[in-house]
Image (tube, rainbow, N blue to C red):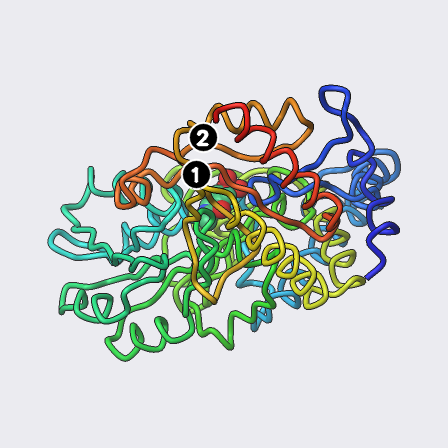
Protein backbone atom coordinates (compact mmCIF):
# COMPACT_ATOMS: atom_id res chain seq x y z
CA UNK A 1 0.00 0.00 0.00
CA UNK A 2 1.48 3.33 -1.09
CA UNK A 3 0.02 5.68 1.56
CA UNK A 4 1.46 8.85 0.04
CA UNK A 5 -0.16 8.01 -3.29
CA UNK A 6 -3.44 7.28 -1.51
CA UNK A 7 -3.24 10.58 0.38
CA UNK A 8 -2.91 12.40 -2.94
CA UNK A 9 -6.35 11.06 -3.82
CA UNK A 10 -7.88 12.90 -0.83
CA UNK A 11 -7.44 16.67 -1.36
CA UNK A 12 -8.96 17.52 2.06
CA UNK A 13 -5.97 15.92 3.80
CA UNK A 14 -3.84 18.84 2.57
CA UNK A 15 -5.78 21.47 4.49
CA UNK A 16 -4.78 23.03 7.76
CA UNK A 17 -6.68 23.46 11.01
CA UNK A 18 -5.62 26.12 13.54
CA UNK A 19 -2.54 26.74 11.38
CA UNK A 20 -1.44 23.12 11.60
CA UNK A 21 -1.70 20.22 9.16
CA UNK A 22 -5.01 18.42 9.61
CA UNK A 23 -4.75 15.03 11.30
CA UNK A 24 -8.11 13.46 10.66
CA UNK A 25 -8.87 10.71 13.18
CA UNK A 26 -12.67 10.83 13.08
CA UNK A 27 -13.14 8.23 10.37
CA UNK A 28 -15.71 6.17 12.28
CA UNK A 29 -18.07 9.16 12.03
CA UNK A 30 -17.39 9.77 8.36
CA UNK A 31 -14.51 8.89 6.09
CA UNK A 32 -13.06 11.37 3.62
CA UNK A 33 -13.94 11.16 -0.06
CA UNK A 34 -11.42 10.44 -2.80
CA UNK A 35 -11.21 12.61 -5.89
CA UNK A 36 -12.58 9.84 -8.15
CA UNK A 37 -15.87 9.82 -6.21
CA UNK A 38 -16.25 13.61 -6.23
CA UNK A 39 -15.36 13.68 -9.93
CA UNK A 40 -17.94 10.99 -10.57
CA UNK A 41 -20.63 13.17 -8.99
CA UNK A 42 -19.59 16.19 -11.07
CA UNK A 43 -19.38 14.11 -14.22
CA UNK A 44 -22.91 12.73 -13.75
CA UNK A 45 -24.31 16.25 -13.32
CA UNK A 46 -22.33 17.58 -16.29
CA UNK A 47 -22.96 14.73 -18.72
CA UNK A 48 -25.77 12.37 -17.79
CA UNK A 49 -28.21 13.98 -15.35
CA UNK A 50 -31.79 12.78 -15.94
CA UNK A 51 -34.43 11.11 -13.80
CA UNK A 52 -34.19 7.34 -13.79
CA UNK A 53 -36.57 4.51 -14.70
CA UNK A 54 -39.34 6.41 -16.46
CA UNK A 55 -37.60 7.92 -19.45
CA UNK A 56 -37.17 6.65 -22.98
CA UNK A 57 -34.64 9.31 -23.85
CA UNK A 58 -30.90 8.60 -23.91
CA UNK A 59 -29.88 10.50 -20.78
CA UNK A 60 -32.56 8.83 -18.69
CA UNK A 61 -31.49 5.43 -19.96
CA UNK A 62 -27.84 6.14 -19.21
CA UNK A 63 -28.71 7.38 -15.72
CA UNK A 64 -30.86 4.30 -15.12
CA UNK A 65 -28.08 2.00 -16.33
CA UNK A 66 -25.56 3.62 -13.97
CA UNK A 67 -27.96 3.46 -11.02
CA UNK A 68 -28.79 -0.22 -11.61
CA UNK A 69 -25.14 -1.05 -12.26
CA UNK A 70 -24.40 0.49 -8.84
CA UNK A 71 -26.96 -1.84 -7.29
CA UNK A 72 -25.22 -4.84 -8.87
CA UNK A 73 -21.85 -3.48 -7.70
CA UNK A 74 -23.12 -3.38 -4.11
CA UNK A 75 -24.64 -6.84 -4.52
CA UNK A 76 -21.27 -8.16 -5.62
CA UNK A 77 -19.37 -6.26 -2.88
CA UNK A 78 -21.38 -7.91 -0.08
CA UNK A 79 -22.06 -11.22 -1.80
CA UNK A 80 -25.85 -10.95 -1.99
CA UNK A 81 -27.72 -13.52 -4.06
CA UNK A 82 -29.64 -11.02 -6.19
CA UNK A 83 -29.71 -7.28 -6.96
CA UNK A 84 -33.34 -7.18 -5.88
CA UNK A 85 -32.12 -7.78 -2.32
CA UNK A 86 -30.27 -4.43 -2.37
CA UNK A 87 -32.43 -1.48 -1.28
CA UNK A 88 -31.01 2.03 -1.55
CA UNK A 89 -31.73 4.20 1.48
CA UNK A 90 -30.38 7.45 2.94
CA UNK A 91 -28.07 5.60 5.31
CA UNK A 92 -27.82 2.91 7.96
CA UNK A 93 -30.36 4.80 10.04
CA UNK A 94 -33.02 4.77 7.36
CA UNK A 95 -32.27 1.14 6.54
CA UNK A 96 -32.94 0.08 10.14
CA UNK A 97 -36.02 2.30 10.36
CA UNK A 98 -37.31 0.57 7.24
CA UNK A 99 -36.97 -2.85 8.90
CA UNK A 100 -38.43 -1.69 12.23
CA UNK A 101 -41.38 -0.13 10.48
CA UNK A 102 -42.10 -2.67 7.76
CA UNK A 103 -40.95 -5.95 9.33
CA UNK A 104 -42.37 -4.64 12.62
CA UNK A 105 -45.81 -3.99 11.13
CA UNK A 106 -45.96 -7.40 9.51
CA UNK A 107 -44.29 -9.70 12.02
CA UNK A 108 -44.28 -8.10 15.49
CA UNK A 109 -47.35 -8.33 17.70
CA UNK A 110 -48.15 -7.31 21.25
CA UNK A 111 -46.03 -9.34 23.64
CA UNK A 112 -43.31 -10.15 21.09
CA UNK A 113 -39.66 -9.54 21.87
CA UNK A 114 -36.62 -8.13 20.07
CA UNK A 115 -33.08 -8.82 21.29
CA UNK A 116 -30.59 -5.94 21.00
CA UNK A 117 -27.16 -5.42 22.54
CA UNK A 118 -26.07 -2.77 25.00
CA UNK A 119 -23.48 -1.54 22.49
CA UNK A 120 -26.04 -0.71 19.78
CA UNK A 121 -25.94 2.70 18.13
CA UNK A 122 -29.09 4.78 18.71
CA UNK A 123 -29.97 3.94 15.09
CA UNK A 124 -30.62 0.36 16.22
CA UNK A 125 -32.45 1.31 19.41
CA UNK A 126 -34.76 4.25 18.77
CA UNK A 127 -36.58 2.79 15.71
CA UNK A 128 -37.62 -0.15 17.94
CA UNK A 129 -38.76 2.25 20.64
CA UNK A 130 -40.83 4.13 18.06
CA UNK A 131 -42.42 0.83 17.13
CA UNK A 132 -43.27 0.38 20.82
CA UNK A 133 -45.73 3.26 20.42
CA UNK A 134 -47.74 1.02 18.07
CA UNK A 135 -46.96 -2.47 19.41
CA UNK A 136 -46.36 -3.60 22.96
CA UNK A 137 -43.05 -5.24 22.14
CA UNK A 138 -40.34 -5.89 24.69
CA UNK A 139 -36.66 -5.10 24.11
CA UNK A 140 -34.14 -7.45 25.67
CA UNK A 141 -30.52 -6.38 25.92
CA UNK A 142 -27.30 -8.41 25.73
CA UNK A 143 -24.71 -7.04 28.22
CA UNK A 144 -20.91 -6.85 27.80
CA UNK A 145 -17.96 -8.05 29.88
CA UNK A 146 -15.05 -5.90 31.13
CA UNK A 147 -13.24 -6.14 27.76
CA UNK A 148 -16.29 -4.81 25.97
CA UNK A 149 -17.34 -8.15 24.47
CA UNK A 150 -20.90 -9.43 24.31
CA UNK A 151 -21.84 -12.02 26.92
CA UNK A 152 -22.91 -14.81 24.61
CA UNK A 153 -24.19 -17.06 27.40
CA UNK A 154 -26.63 -14.32 28.39
CA UNK A 155 -27.51 -13.77 24.72
CA UNK A 156 -28.63 -17.38 24.42
CA UNK A 157 -30.68 -17.14 27.62
CA UNK A 158 -32.64 -14.16 26.27
CA UNK A 159 -34.39 -16.26 23.62
CA UNK A 160 -37.88 -17.53 24.28
CA UNK A 161 -40.98 -18.38 22.24
CA UNK A 162 -41.83 -14.66 21.85
CA UNK A 163 -38.45 -13.68 20.34
CA UNK A 164 -39.02 -12.40 16.80
CA UNK A 165 -35.80 -10.61 15.81
CA UNK A 166 -32.20 -9.96 16.88
CA UNK A 167 -30.51 -6.62 16.12
CA UNK A 168 -26.73 -6.49 16.52
CA UNK A 169 -23.85 -4.29 15.38
CA UNK A 170 -21.11 -6.30 13.70
CA UNK A 171 -18.54 -3.79 14.99
CA UNK A 172 -19.11 -1.36 17.88
CA UNK A 173 -18.55 2.28 16.93
CA UNK A 174 -17.36 3.01 20.48
CA UNK A 175 -15.48 -0.09 21.64
CA UNK A 176 -14.31 -1.34 18.27
CA UNK A 177 -15.32 -4.86 19.34
CA UNK A 178 -15.91 -7.20 16.42
CA UNK A 179 -18.92 -9.24 17.46
CA UNK A 180 -19.17 -12.91 16.46
CA UNK A 181 -22.26 -12.24 14.34
CA UNK A 182 -21.89 -15.39 12.27
CA UNK A 183 -22.19 -17.55 15.39
CA UNK A 184 -24.92 -15.31 16.83
CA UNK A 185 -26.91 -15.64 13.61
CA UNK A 186 -26.47 -19.42 13.57
CA UNK A 187 -27.79 -19.60 17.13
CA UNK A 188 -30.74 -17.28 16.40
CA UNK A 189 -31.63 -19.36 13.34
CA UNK A 190 -31.55 -22.52 15.46
CA UNK A 191 -34.29 -20.79 17.48
CA UNK A 192 -36.16 -19.79 14.31
CA UNK A 193 -35.33 -16.08 14.76
CA UNK A 194 -34.02 -13.78 11.97
CA UNK A 195 -31.15 -11.30 12.54
CA UNK A 196 -30.58 -7.70 11.46
CA UNK A 197 -26.90 -6.74 11.39
CA UNK A 198 -25.86 -3.09 11.70
CA UNK A 199 -22.79 -3.14 9.49
CA UNK A 200 -21.99 0.59 9.54
CA UNK A 201 -18.61 0.09 11.22
CA UNK A 202 -17.85 -3.32 9.75
CA UNK A 203 -18.18 -2.64 6.05
CA UNK A 204 -15.13 -0.29 5.77
CA UNK A 205 -12.83 -2.70 7.60
CA UNK A 206 -13.97 -6.30 7.15
CA UNK A 207 -14.72 -8.37 4.09
CA UNK A 208 -18.45 -9.01 4.46
CA UNK A 209 -20.37 -11.74 2.70
CA UNK A 210 -24.03 -11.63 3.70
CA UNK A 211 -24.70 -15.14 2.44
CA UNK A 212 -21.77 -16.57 4.36
CA UNK A 213 -22.97 -14.73 7.50
CA UNK A 214 -26.49 -15.87 6.65
CA UNK A 215 -27.73 -12.42 7.79
CA UNK A 216 -31.41 -11.77 7.19
CA UNK A 217 -30.85 -8.00 7.02
CA UNK A 218 -27.61 -6.04 6.74
CA UNK A 219 -27.44 -2.23 6.90
CA UNK A 220 -24.60 0.21 6.17
CA UNK A 221 -23.78 3.74 4.97
CA UNK A 222 -21.74 4.84 1.97
CA UNK A 223 -20.16 7.81 3.73
CA UNK A 224 -18.25 5.57 6.14
CA UNK A 225 -16.59 3.69 3.28
CA UNK A 226 -15.27 6.59 1.20
CA UNK A 227 -18.58 7.13 -0.61
CA UNK A 228 -20.91 10.13 -0.73
CA UNK A 229 -23.23 11.21 2.09
CA UNK A 230 -26.92 10.42 1.89
CA UNK A 231 -26.61 6.88 0.49
CA UNK A 232 -27.22 3.76 2.52
CA UNK A 233 -27.86 0.12 1.82
CA UNK A 234 -30.36 -2.27 3.24
CA UNK A 235 -29.67 -5.84 2.26
CA UNK A 236 -32.56 -8.17 2.99
CA UNK A 237 -33.20 -11.77 2.09
CA UNK A 238 -35.75 -11.88 -0.66
CA UNK A 239 -38.08 -14.10 1.36
CA UNK A 240 -38.36 -11.38 4.03
CA UNK A 241 -38.50 -8.39 1.71
CA UNK A 242 -41.20 -10.11 -0.36
CA UNK A 243 -43.30 -10.65 2.75
CA UNK A 244 -42.89 -7.10 4.08
CA UNK A 245 -45.21 -4.19 3.23
CA UNK A 246 -43.87 -0.99 1.58
CA UNK A 247 -42.19 1.52 3.90
CA UNK A 248 -43.11 4.72 2.06
CA UNK A 249 -45.55 5.37 -0.76
CA UNK A 250 -45.11 7.37 -3.94
CA UNK A 251 -43.66 7.08 -7.40
CA UNK A 252 -41.22 4.32 -8.39
CA UNK A 253 -42.66 1.82 -5.91
CA UNK A 254 -45.98 1.01 -7.60
CA UNK A 255 -47.19 -1.34 -10.31
CA UNK A 256 -50.56 0.31 -10.81
CA UNK A 257 -52.35 3.10 -8.97
CA UNK A 258 -56.10 3.51 -8.82
CA UNK A 259 -58.20 5.37 -6.28
CA UNK A 260 -59.93 2.09 -5.57
CA UNK A 261 -56.59 0.48 -4.74
CA UNK A 262 -52.92 0.29 -5.67
CA UNK A 263 -50.66 -2.64 -6.45
CA UNK A 264 -47.05 -2.34 -5.45
CA UNK A 265 -43.99 -2.82 -7.60
CA UNK A 266 -41.52 -5.67 -7.55
CA UNK A 267 -38.40 -5.76 -5.40
CA UNK A 268 -36.34 -3.72 -4.90
CA UNK A 269 -38.53 -0.85 -6.12
CA UNK A 270 -41.30 -1.62 -3.63
CA UNK A 271 -39.06 -0.07 -0.98
CA UNK A 272 -37.73 2.85 -3.02
CA UNK A 273 -40.48 5.46 -3.21
CA UNK A 274 -39.64 8.65 -5.08
CA UNK A 275 -36.66 9.70 -7.14
CA UNK A 276 -33.57 7.95 -5.78
CA UNK A 277 -30.21 9.67 -5.37
CA UNK A 278 -28.98 8.14 -8.61
CA UNK A 279 -26.02 10.54 -8.68
CA UNK A 280 -24.94 9.29 -5.27
CA UNK A 281 -25.52 5.59 -5.96
CA UNK A 282 -23.40 5.69 -9.10
CA UNK A 283 -20.65 7.59 -7.27
CA UNK A 284 -20.82 5.05 -4.46
CA UNK A 285 -20.04 2.29 -6.94
CA UNK A 286 -16.86 4.18 -7.85
CA UNK A 287 -15.96 4.36 -4.14
CA UNK A 288 -16.26 0.57 -3.92
CA UNK A 289 -14.07 0.24 -7.02
CA UNK A 290 -11.53 2.49 -5.33
CA UNK A 291 -11.56 0.39 -2.14
CA UNK A 292 -11.16 -2.82 -4.13
CA UNK A 293 -8.32 -1.34 -6.16
CA UNK A 294 -6.37 -0.96 -2.90
CA UNK A 295 -7.75 -4.08 -1.24
CA UNK A 296 -9.88 -4.23 1.89
CA UNK A 297 -7.55 -6.77 3.51
CA UNK A 298 -4.52 -4.50 3.02
CA UNK A 299 -6.51 -1.52 4.32
CA UNK A 300 -7.60 -3.43 7.42
CA UNK A 301 -4.07 -4.68 8.13
CA UNK A 302 -2.74 -1.13 7.90
CA UNK A 303 -5.45 0.30 10.16
CA UNK A 304 -5.02 -2.46 12.73
CA UNK A 305 -1.29 -1.88 12.83
CA UNK A 306 -1.91 1.83 13.48
CA UNK A 307 -4.50 1.03 16.15
CA UNK A 308 -2.17 -1.32 18.04
CA UNK A 309 0.82 1.01 17.71
CA UNK A 310 -1.20 3.96 19.01
CA UNK A 311 -2.83 1.95 21.81
CA UNK A 312 0.56 0.80 23.11
CA UNK A 313 1.74 4.42 23.39
CA UNK A 314 -1.49 5.64 24.93
CA UNK A 315 -1.20 2.99 27.64
CA UNK A 316 2.02 4.69 28.82
CA UNK A 317 0.06 7.79 29.86
CA UNK A 318 -0.83 7.94 33.54
CA UNK A 319 -4.56 7.92 34.23
CA UNK A 320 -5.39 6.54 30.76
CA UNK A 321 -8.53 4.40 30.50
CA UNK A 322 -9.22 2.64 27.22
CA UNK A 323 -12.73 1.34 26.66
CA UNK A 324 -12.83 -1.78 24.50
CA UNK A 325 -9.86 -4.10 24.89
CA UNK A 326 -11.06 -7.18 23.06
CA UNK A 327 -8.42 -8.95 20.96
CA UNK A 328 -11.12 -8.99 18.26
CA UNK A 329 -11.15 -5.29 17.66
CA UNK A 330 -11.42 -2.86 14.76
CA UNK A 331 -9.42 0.38 14.37
CA UNK A 332 -11.29 2.48 16.95
CA UNK A 333 -9.84 3.64 20.29
CA UNK A 334 -12.16 5.16 22.90
CA UNK A 335 -10.49 6.63 25.96
CA UNK A 336 -10.58 8.99 28.92
CA UNK A 337 -7.71 10.46 30.89
CA UNK A 338 -8.41 10.89 34.62
CA UNK A 339 -9.27 14.46 35.50
CA UNK A 340 -9.78 15.64 31.90
CA UNK A 341 -13.28 16.00 30.52
CA UNK A 342 -13.68 14.40 27.10
CA UNK A 343 -14.97 17.67 25.67
CA UNK A 344 -11.92 19.64 26.86
CA UNK A 345 -9.67 16.96 25.43
CA UNK A 346 -11.40 17.13 22.04
CA UNK A 347 -11.25 20.93 21.88
CA UNK A 348 -7.60 21.11 22.84
CA UNK A 349 -6.63 18.38 20.38
CA UNK A 350 -8.47 20.32 17.68
CA UNK A 351 -6.35 23.38 18.47
CA UNK A 352 -3.36 21.15 17.73
CA UNK A 353 -4.84 20.10 14.40
CA UNK A 354 -6.10 16.69 15.52
CA UNK A 355 -9.75 15.88 14.72
CA UNK A 356 -11.23 13.34 17.12
CA UNK A 357 -14.80 12.67 18.21
CA UNK A 358 -16.01 13.29 21.75
CA UNK A 359 -19.25 12.54 23.56
CA UNK A 360 -21.61 9.60 23.79
CA UNK A 361 -21.16 8.55 20.13
CA UNK A 362 -24.91 7.90 19.78
CA UNK A 363 -24.56 5.05 22.26
CA UNK A 364 -25.90 6.45 25.52
CA UNK A 365 -27.06 3.08 26.91
CA UNK A 366 -23.48 1.84 26.48
CA UNK A 367 -22.15 4.94 28.28
CA UNK A 368 -24.59 4.31 31.13
CA UNK A 369 -23.47 0.69 31.40
CA UNK A 370 -19.83 1.86 31.53
CA UNK A 371 -20.75 4.45 34.17
CA UNK A 372 -19.47 7.38 32.08
CA UNK A 373 -20.97 10.25 30.07
CA UNK A 374 -18.72 10.07 27.07
CA UNK A 375 -15.30 9.27 25.70
CA UNK A 376 -12.75 10.63 23.27
CA UNK A 377 -12.56 8.43 20.19
CA UNK A 378 -9.85 8.16 17.57
CA UNK A 379 -10.52 6.05 14.50
CA UNK A 380 -8.27 5.25 11.57
CA UNK A 381 -8.73 4.98 7.83
CA UNK A 382 -6.56 3.81 4.93
CA UNK A 383 -4.88 7.23 4.52
CA UNK A 384 -3.70 7.68 8.12
CA UNK A 385 0.03 7.34 8.76
CA UNK A 386 2.34 6.38 11.57
CA UNK A 387 3.60 9.97 11.56
CA UNK A 388 0.03 11.10 12.24
CA UNK A 389 -0.27 8.59 15.07
CA UNK A 390 2.97 10.00 16.53
CA UNK A 391 1.68 13.56 16.16
CA UNK A 392 -1.54 12.57 17.90
CA UNK A 393 0.40 11.01 20.78
CA UNK A 394 2.56 14.13 21.08
CA UNK A 395 -0.57 16.31 21.12
CA UNK A 396 -2.12 14.04 23.73
CA UNK A 397 0.95 14.46 25.98
CA UNK A 398 0.74 18.23 25.57
CA UNK A 399 -2.91 18.31 26.59
CA UNK A 400 -2.33 16.03 29.57
CA UNK A 401 0.54 18.26 30.74
CA UNK A 402 -1.78 21.30 30.75
CA UNK A 403 -3.89 19.58 33.40
CA UNK A 404 -1.09 18.25 35.61
C1 LIG B 1 -22.70 5.67 11.98
C2 LIG B 1 -23.44 4.52 12.51
C3 LIG B 1 -24.82 4.39 12.32
C4 LIG B 1 -25.65 5.44 11.65
O1 LIG B 1 -25.23 5.69 10.34
P1 LIG B 1 -25.87 6.90 9.51
O2 LIG B 1 -24.99 7.01 8.34
O3 LIG B 1 -25.80 8.09 10.42
O4 LIG B 1 -27.27 6.52 9.20
C5 LIG B 1 -25.44 3.28 12.83
N1 LIG B 1 -24.75 2.32 13.45
C6 LIG B 1 -23.42 2.40 13.65
C7 LIG B 1 -22.70 1.29 14.35
C8 LIG B 1 -22.72 3.51 13.20
O5 LIG B 1 -21.41 3.60 13.40
Q: Please, what secondary structure does the residue beneath circle 2 have?
A: helix
Q: Nearer the viewer, residue 195 or 381?
A: 381
Q: Is residue 84 left or right of residue 96?
A: right
Whether residue 271 can be seen here: yes
Q: Residue at x 82, y 53 (%)?
A: 3
In the picture of the structure, the residue carrying the numbered disc 1 is 336
Q: Nearer the viewer, residue 110 or 143?
A: 143
- The residue lying furthest to the top in this view is 18
Q: Residue at x 13, y 51 (%)?
A: 110
Report the disc number at residue 342: 2
Report the disc number at residue 180: none
Residue 390, percent from left and from top: 69, 44
Dots 1, 2 in contact, CB < 8 A = yes
- The residue lying furthest to the bottom in this view is 190
Q: Residue at x 24, y 66 (%)?
A: 155
Q: Residue at x 27, y 80 (%)?
A: 190
Amino acid sequence: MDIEKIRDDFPILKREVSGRPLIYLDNAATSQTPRCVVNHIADTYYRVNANVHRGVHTLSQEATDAHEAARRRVQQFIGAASPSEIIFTRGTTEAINLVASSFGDEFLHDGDEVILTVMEHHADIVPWQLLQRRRKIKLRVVPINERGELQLDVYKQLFNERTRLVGVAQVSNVLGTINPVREMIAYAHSQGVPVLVDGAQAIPHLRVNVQDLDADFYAFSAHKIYGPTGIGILYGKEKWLDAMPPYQGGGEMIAHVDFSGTTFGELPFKFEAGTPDYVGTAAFASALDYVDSIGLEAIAAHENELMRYTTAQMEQIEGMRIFGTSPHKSSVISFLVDGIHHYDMGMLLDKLGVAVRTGHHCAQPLMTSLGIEGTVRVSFAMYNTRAEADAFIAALHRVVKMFR
